Amino acid sequence: MVHSVPPRTPRPQPVRRRPRLRLLLASGAASAALAAGTVLPVQPLLPAPQQAQAADDGKKVLTVAVSQSVDSLSPFLAQRLVSTSLHRLTYEYLTNYDPKDAHTVPGFATAWKASASKLTWTFTIRDDSKWSDGVRATAEDAAWTFNKMMTDENAATANGSFTANFKKVTAPDPETLVIELKKPQATMTALDVPIVPKHIWEKVGDFSTFNNDKQFPIVGNGPFIVTDYKVDQYVRLKPNKDFWRGAPKFDELVLKYYKDGDAAVAALQKGEVSFTSGLTPAQAAALKSADNIKVNDAPGRRFYALATNPGARSKDGATFGNGHPALLDPAVRKALFQAVDRKAIVDRVFQGHAVEGQGYIPPRFDAYFWQPSESQRIAYDPAAAARTLDAAGYRKTGGGKRVGKDGRPLDFRILCHATDPNDKAIGKYLQEWWGRLGIGLKVECLDNVSDPWLSGDYDLAFDGWSVNPDPDFVLSIHTCDALPATPEDTGATDNFICDKEYDGLYAQQAVEYDTAKRTELVKQMESRLYDTGYMNVMAYPNAVEAYRTDQIKSITTMPEAAGNLWGQDGYWSWWSAVPAGDGDGSGGSSSSTGVVIGIGAAVVAAAALGLFVAMRRRSTAEDRE
């Protein structure tokens, strides 16, 4: 962060929901990270789940262990996965996505149609939705939400990319919403924006500082209502008895914060929580043999990547931060990535619970999944990495250190999440691999990586996003338009990438309604992002989760055939969950409930990925975590 006055508004931690996979390393310098992979022994299970009896009032409570802090309870500001997942539960969006195959289904809108020019979209708003304070929810609420985002840049912090192309939004009557566009927009059935109650939010003054965390319960119209919140402790929600789709079956949903993954697993073993995610391979193996616990191991929605600092900058042309100038050289970036052994990362760190990284979109979304050609692919080849550096003029000194043309040593820093042993373990490997090239690496593990990331005070960083069937948002964060307006602002950029060729492709795909043509444009964007070398996707981690069967009788994954529970997809999971002991085994879902276990790293098609199955991560982006 640029330390000037006024300070930049803090943004959420740049990776929205990094899985807390512990590790067991077999050999090499990385073996020093073994301690981080210590797994608590399986605890004896209590005869009655403590969590369900915590209040001594017979309430059936579904407690979800989370590892991420809530950045904001304002849907206009929130960008972390835990926060955006909460908003999916507490506010209606115009559309939703079927858990079976992710095709678009009604949400706040029951129907939608486009004009012949595709410049005017008319949504029919349901007449059976009301706010939790009893006021009817209407098209006027949706129009006010979008107009606020269009006219107040502080209200566009989280989801402004969706309304940037809007020309005019009106509500001619309570059940009709009309959106006029400047040009066609391919995400119109995937407007992943929480609709808020106008009569509540029109009283807010400064949207940049209002976090919606002072008065409870929070007024919403989703399946749950937020009733209480304590920073880095818990969020409590109760069912919305008037929810049009039907009220959730648990009496209360609690998101309980655990900074340490082992503590969350121990709480699951004791019955103090109902569900936890981000399991390490050792934790998953131990839990599979435990009574009353079911492990879900499915292809994930995330990618896990290295990001380089391409030179932090703002739209006004100002540069800031202290990134190493050598990383502006494509040859240096290429050499670093030639010395990354993705297979070793998958095998040794993720213990096989991941797929080797290639393009930007995970293979779970097969229509958009892209792989580099053989001639384009940056393969693991340390000898080639050394030759790349030699040819670019980065010579080795007598002491074996690699130096630049200016004589400055190639000594880099990498931002690491202190709570993520993956970062720590892979950092050890990178130190070993890059050290052989004569490159130094300092692994800077911090509880808060936001400040140095936003200020450009880093050389490299561990990065990752959750991707949903429509990739528009995770693609948008690498456009020039996502840069902050000035060094004092925040913007929506991931790591300050600004490439005109990439931007041109993004603009084309954003207005392309033909599925095949848009898919090809997205793949061209992935190819361009790969070639610039600013991002190196190392792995696609599995979603490895577990829940207690003596607390949860049935629950829906997304996709149902081989999907995950945690994340924004959790709308269906937590809404459909049936408490153990309930006579009715159905979760009320439009599709069957139940979890498919032990899927492994198989690649699963997420859906037919046309315009009408579009959905972006918000992780997200699983979020940036």
Image: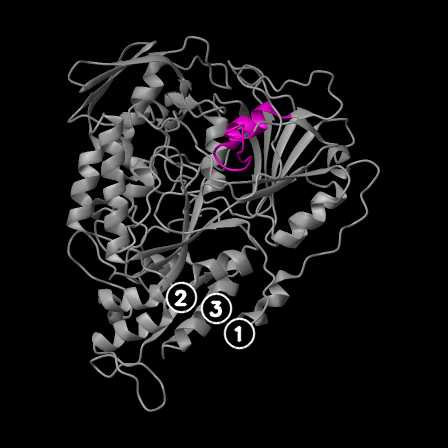
Residues marked 3 and 1 touching at CB (< 8 Å)? yes
Separation of marks 2 and 1 at Cα, in angstroms: 17 Å
| Mark sitting on residue 181 | none
Q: Is residue 44 left or right of residue 98?
A: right
Q: Residue at 51% across / 19% down in the picture? A: 132
| SS label for mark 1 | helix
Q: Is residue 303 left or right of residue 183?
A: right
Q: Residue at 54% across / 36% down in the picture? A: 564
Camera-side residue of 613 and 189 = 613
Q: In this view, does 544 lie above or below 307?
A: above
Q: Which residue position is annotated with label 2?
A: 414
**Which three-letter amino acid code belongs to the residue tagged 2?**
Ile
Q: Quadrant of the N terminus?
A: bottom left
Q: Which residue position is annotated with label 1?
A: 29
Residues marked 2 and 3 touching at CB (< 8 Å)? no
Q: Is residue 274 magenta?
A: no
Residue 276 visible in this rendered orientation of the protein:
no
- Mostly what secondary structure, the magenta segment? loop
| SS label for mark 3 | helix
- The answer to which of marks 2 and 1 sits earlier in the sequence is 1
**Of labels 2 and 3, the one closer to you:** 3
Q: Is residue 104 left or right of residue 30?
A: left
**Which three-letter amino acid code belongs to the residue tagged 3?**
Tyr
Q: Quadrant of residue 406?
A: bottom left
| Mark sitting on residue 429 | 3
Please state the extent of the stretch shown in magenta in the rendering.
557-577
